[in-house]
Structures are given as C-alpha cells and as structure tokens.
Image (cartoon, grey):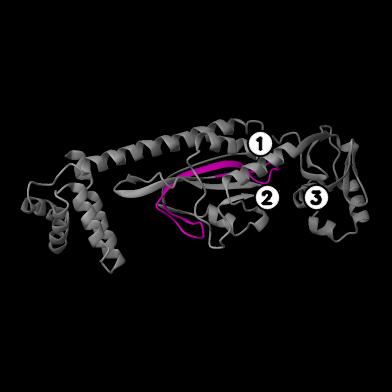
Amino acid sequence: MATLTRAHQELFRRTPDECFDSFDALYRRCKSDREQSEDRWVRSENLVLTHDLTLCLEDATDLRLNDWSFSQLCRMAGVSRDTINRLSPKTASRAFEETLPAAEKPLQFLTREDEVRSIHGVAYTRLWNIELLDLVREFGSDFSPPQRAMDGQSTGLYCGEQDMFAFMIDPTGWAEIDGEAFAPGFFLWNSEVGRRSLGIQTFWFQRICQNHIVWDATEIVEFTRKHTANVRSGLGEIRRIIEQLVAKRDARRDGFVDVMRKAMHATLGSDADEVSKQLAKHGLPRGLIKEALESAEQHGAFTIFSIVDALTRLSQRVVLAGDRVELDAKIGQLLSLAVAA
C-alpha cells in the first residue's frame, strides 16, 4: 500500500484566497472564470507593449500582465524575469521589443477584464476547469472534500490564477478489501493557462490525516494529458475513470452489505462449546472467546455478527497497538465465514 502526498503538497503551497470551503464555492469560481475570460488571437506585429508594461491587443488596450503571463512573456523573449525586474518599465518594454521573436502564426492571449491571464502559441489547446467539475457533478456527486486540514481552513479544494486542484472522497463508500476497510477517493487537477497538465488519480484509502496525507492507499489509477490538440479527449477518459471508481464502490458496498446480512443470520455452531472450538481454530485467545460468547448469548444467538461485534469491542482493551491490530485482523476474517455459510 502507498502513501499519497499530492494533496499535502497542495495544502502548503496555497494562499488563503485560493482555498474554497465547498465544492459549490469552487464550482462558482471556475464558472465565473470561464464566463469572464476571452481568447484573443493576435499576430506578433500587432502586439504593442507600452512603457508601463501593459499590452495593447488591437481592440483591447492597457491590459496588465499577471505573474504567470509575465513569466510566459519572458520565456518567449528568452530573457530572465529577474533581469527584466531590475529594469525600469520603459527599459523593460524596449528589451521586450528587441527580444520577442516575430512569428507568422498568431499568439493566443487569454484575458479577463483588464488582465492577461496567459499567452500561448497555436499548439496550446485550452480545457476549462468548469468542464472537469461538470464531470464530477454528473458522475461523482456522492464525493465531497475530506475533513479540514490542520489550519482549520483548507478543505482540499483550490483554485488560483495558475491552476485548479480538487481532493474528493466518498465518506459513505467504505467497503472491505482483503479483510480491511477502505473508502474511495480521487485527486483532480487542471490549468486553464498552461501551468500544469490535465489529470486525475483515483485510489482506495484507509486514513487521511490533518495534513491531508492519504495513508495506506491501494488500487491507484492515474491519468494525465498535456494541453495539446487531443486534450479534450482526456475528458472522456476521466469520465470513464470516475465511472469505474463509482461502479466498483457500489459493487463492493453491496457485497459488504450482503456479507453483513448473512453474518446476522449465520451461526458458527449450535451451542457455546461448538462455537468456542471454531473460534479457537482462528487463533483467538480462550479468555477473549469466553467473554465474547457470554456477551453474544445475552443477545439471544451465536450469530457470526454478534460474535464479531462482541470480539471487536473487547479487543479495544488490548493496550499494545501491534497486538490490537493483529487481533482485529483475526476477528475481521470471521466475516468471511458468512459467505461460506
């Protein structure tokens, strides 16, 4: 089993204004970004950079660069942003005029009001964050963010000027895998401005700490795609991955419920002696067996469920964590007897 730290890393790199307290709040932000943003295609000879380092794009004037689009402009010019930052705005604009390459094909500018969000060439294909969140709404509606992190604010839902990240789990999706309890979850990420690829990682986990580290993860599936011409086909693949996770959750949960139903009726024997012999075969201590049988008998029957319930409560008295984990594993294996019963 693996330890997943992707959400943990997001937690410590995000500013408060990038954190959202609910999926609906994140959805509204991404919807607003989509509605207020506009793609503009401009040839390099029609690009004007003023002495105040604002851009004029034909019909749009005095557009300011944000941190990301400024970095992109520096990379296009082949000049270090640290060097540009040491220059006066007037000198910096002259430096860009002399270093920005002329291109036959137009440049793609993503703008929002008076801000330039990103600058790309024709090879870049945009995919909006809201399109991913629409998939979650339609095919993963049972999933929600985990408990708040140690800062009391971060929920695992983030969106800033450069990218979006969502950490979602199904708190009711617990099921048994190889005798242990797991729940499903996934990470989802994208960037509308080319900061990172499109991607999803699904998994089954046992525990999430307040640092948003996912412990004891299994059945990990990851898919990523760059923002090139075929990026939109990635939406279909992500939809398929979410649907598979939901289908497996439903099948496992139904199977778990079926096992519990059988365990409430199946017995390990007709009397205490017979049941005691069966439990001893599974390596359970005799003293614990005696107490569990006395407790189960008070409920009127030696069903597998009543015995497992009694043993589980009694195991909590074991002081050493290692011994308790080993004992709980033996107790959990008793539920498999309900399938054969």
Amino acid residing under circle 2? Gly
CA neighbours of label 2 inside 10 A, class few (<14), some (14 to 19), many (20+): some
Amino acid residing under circle 1? Leu
Q: Secondary structure at mark 1?
A: loop
Cα–Cα gap, marks 1 and 2: 16 Å
Q: Between disc 3 and disc 2, whose residue precedes?
A: 3
Q: Secondary structure at mark 3?
A: helix
- Image quadrant assignment for residue 184: top left
Q: Between disc 1 and disc 3, whose residue precedes?
A: 3
On the image, the x and y values in percent for residue 157 come to: 58, 50
- Whether residue 312 is situated above or below residue 252 in the rendered picture: below
Judging by the rendered image, the residue that carries numbered circle 3 is 74
In this rendering, which labeled residue sits more in front, label 1 or label 2? 2
Asked whether the residues under the numbered discs 1 and 3 touch, taking CB atoms below 8 Å apart as contact, a structural biologist would say: no
Amino acid residing under circle 3? Cys
Q: Nearer the viewer, residue 98 or 19?
A: 19
144 within the magenta span? no
| Residue 199 in the figure: left or right of residue 322 | right
CA neighbours of label 1 inside 10 A, class few (<14), some (14 to 19), many (20+): many
In this rendering, which labeled residue sits more in front, label 1 or label 3? 1
196 within the magenta span? yes
On the image, the x and y values in percent for residue 240 come to: 49, 32
Judging by the rendered image, the residue that carries numbered circle 1 is 127
In this rendering, which labeled residue sits more in front, label 3 or label 2? 2
Taking the spot 50% from the left edge, 52% from the top edge, the residue there is 146
